[in-house]
Image (tube, rainbow, N blue to C red):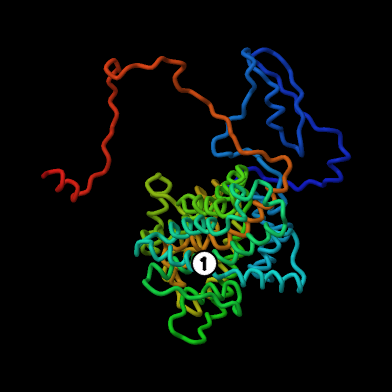
């Protein structure tokens, strides 16, 4: 989901002491030579444009999917896919998962450093006092169909929240509104506080139960589970082991460089749109089965395998391109995803509370068999974060279509960190990629009676009910 190169950390002091780096390019079309400047070891797009064809048109870099494109300088997270390294602001993900909490990690991502005791106390209070949503928001959510997809509800509602805060909308309050640190912080508190409540409401809506009001005396993850599960108990408290497990999962999902949804944050922010619409757009990107829906696909795959004895045939079908191996391989990691290792460790604690999920046996055996097979090892197909997270979510009783919601809640912290970084990046402009046009050249308008007949397929799906009506 991110660039495939193996990055290296540069020393700013050493870089500034060196002479400007360049690369020499020979244009074989005309024999011209160019010396193009690099910045931090990367070729600038403006430098490449110095190479021109016979018509004087500048050279462009063609990169569908942005597989080898850098579009920003960031300090939020670092990934070395070859070595299986993930760091948030320099801190290894393994240390954060073991020693920190999600709310503390959210502070780290957004502000760049771990909070002091007093900072954390203030931060926690600010977030937890913004967990209440406007009654009109709750009422609006009740108007969704009973079977509406929870991600559809979440995306729509986050976007709708923007209409409740016109004072924080650049389209209404002026493009400089986010120059104010206080206004920025206010939206951060609101979004991090509101999203778990909206997510919980989407879950409750699906099961036909009233929404639970948030409890400010509970922790961030603890409060989320409370809003999901509390019925009529006067003092309901989620199990601490389940709270801890979900907190760790939230930490692991909080940030992951310029994946599809995070890139969407920067893309949308470049237009100057409000932060609620920006976050909603990122959540919409996460909704896609190739991104946030991947762990749901893992569950469906494991269920289709059905039994450990069917794994050898399944892997043969994968090799013969008859089936897909979900949860293995990654656009970045060419080693074992460090997040997958951590998730695998916490499965036992979850199973102690809710019972062992039968699919875990298939998952463990599938991993063993795949990593013993030269075909998959040679292609560096190792389990990623989606492989085991889906199993834990299923064991905890979450429906599979709710998995992307559980991904969205923590990733909001990473999105907000990139949103802030974009606002303060003087190099950034409104995003406007180029295209490789291969359509018609100039042609004159043709009147309808004189047009050539083309065979366009214009039919759409028709239900049996529609056929009954059309037969009348």
What residue would you read off at disc 1? Answer: 134
Query: Is residue 360 visible to us here?
Result: no
Looking at the rendered image, the quarter that the C terminus falls into is top left
**What residue do we see at 60% from left, 62% from top?**
252
Q: Residue furthest bottom?
A: 234
Residue 62 horizontal/vertical position (percent): 58, 30
- Quadrant position of residue 270: top right
Measuring 67% from the left and 12% from the top, which residue is drawn there?
Answer: 30
Where residue 58 appears, as percent x and y from the top left, is 64, 21
Residue at image location 42% in from the left, 70% down from the top = 204
* Depth order, front residue of 22/336: 22
Q: Residue furthest left?
A: 472
Between 14 and 261, the residue placed more toward the observer is 261
Location of residue 334 in the rendering, given as x and y in whole percent from the top left corner: 60, 49
Q: Say which element carries label 1.
A: loop
Residue at (77% x, 70% y) in the render: 116
State the image coordinates of residue 158 (x, y, percent, origin top left).
Answer: 51, 58
**Residue closer to the observer: 136 or 326:** 136
Q: How many marks?
A: 1
- Of 240 and 80, nearer the camera is 240
The furthest residue to the right: 17
- Relative horizontal placement of residue 404, taking residue 316 as reference (left or right): right
Q: Is residue 236 visible?
A: yes
Give the side of residue 69 with respect to residue 311, left or right.
right
Q: Quadrant of residue 143?
A: bottom left
Q: Considering only vertical position in the picture, is 413 above or below 124?
A: above
Could you say which quadrant of the image residue 321 lies in?
top left
Label 1: how many residues lie within 10 Å, few (<14), some (14-19) or many (20+)? few
């Amino acid at each position: 989901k991110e660039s495939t190169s193996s990055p290296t950390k540069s020393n700013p002091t050493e870089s500034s002491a060196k002479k400007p780096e360049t690369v020499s390019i020979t244009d074989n079309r005309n024999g011209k030579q160019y010396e193009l400047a690099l910045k931090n070891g990367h070729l600038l797009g403006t430098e490449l444009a110095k190479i021109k064809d016979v018509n004087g048109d500048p050279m462009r870099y063609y990169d569908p999917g942005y597989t080898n494109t850098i579009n920003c300088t960031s300090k939020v997270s670092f990934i070395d896919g070859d070595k299986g390294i993930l760091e948030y602001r320099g801190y290894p993900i393994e240390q954060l998962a073991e020693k920190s909490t999600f709310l503390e990690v959210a502070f780290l991502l957004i502000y760049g450093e771990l909070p002091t005791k007093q900072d954390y106390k203030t931060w926690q209070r600010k977030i937890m006092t913004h967990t209440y949503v406007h009654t009109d928001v709750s009422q609006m959510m009740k108007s969704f169909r009973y079977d509406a997809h929870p991600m559809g509800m979440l995306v729509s509602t986050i976007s709708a929240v923007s209409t409740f805060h016109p004072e924080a909308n650049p389209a209404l309050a002026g493009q400089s509104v986010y120059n104010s640190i206080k206004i920025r912080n206010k939206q951060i508190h609101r979004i991090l506080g509101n999203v778990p409540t909206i997510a919980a409401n989407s879950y409750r809506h699906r099961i036909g139960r009233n929404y639970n009001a948030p409890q400010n005396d509970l922790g961030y993850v603890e409060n989320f589970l409370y809003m999901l599960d509390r019925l009529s108990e006067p003092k309901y408290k989620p199990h601490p082991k389940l709270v801890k497990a979900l907190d760790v999962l939230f930490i692991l999902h909080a940030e992951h460089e310029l994946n599809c949804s995070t890139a969407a944050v920067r893309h949308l922010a470049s237009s100057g749109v409000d932060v609620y619409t920006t976050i909603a757009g990122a959540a919409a990107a996460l909704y896609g089965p190739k991104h946030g829906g991947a762990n749901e696909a893992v569950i469906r795959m494991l269920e289709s395998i059905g039994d450990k004895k069917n794994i050898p045939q399944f892997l043969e079908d994968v090799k013969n391109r008859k089936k897909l191996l979900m949860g293995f391989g990654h656009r970045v990691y060419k080693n074992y995803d460090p997040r997958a290792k951590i998730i695998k460790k916490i499965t036992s604690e979850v199973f102690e509370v809710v019972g062992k999920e039968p699919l875990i046996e298939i998952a463990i055996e599938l991993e063993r068999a795949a990593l013993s097979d030269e075909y998959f090892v040679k292609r560096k197909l190792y389990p990623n974060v989606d492989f085991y997270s889906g199993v834990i979510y299923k064991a905890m009783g979450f429906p599979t279509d709710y998995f992307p919601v559980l991904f969205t809640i923590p990733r909001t912290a990473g999105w907000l960190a990139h949103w802030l970084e974009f606002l303060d990046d003087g190099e950034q402009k409104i995003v406007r990629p180029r295209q490789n046009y291969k359509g018609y050249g100039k042609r004159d308008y043709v009147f309808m009676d004189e047009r050539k007949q083309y065979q366009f397929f214009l039919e759409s799906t028709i239900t049996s009910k529609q056929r009954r009506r059309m037969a009348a």
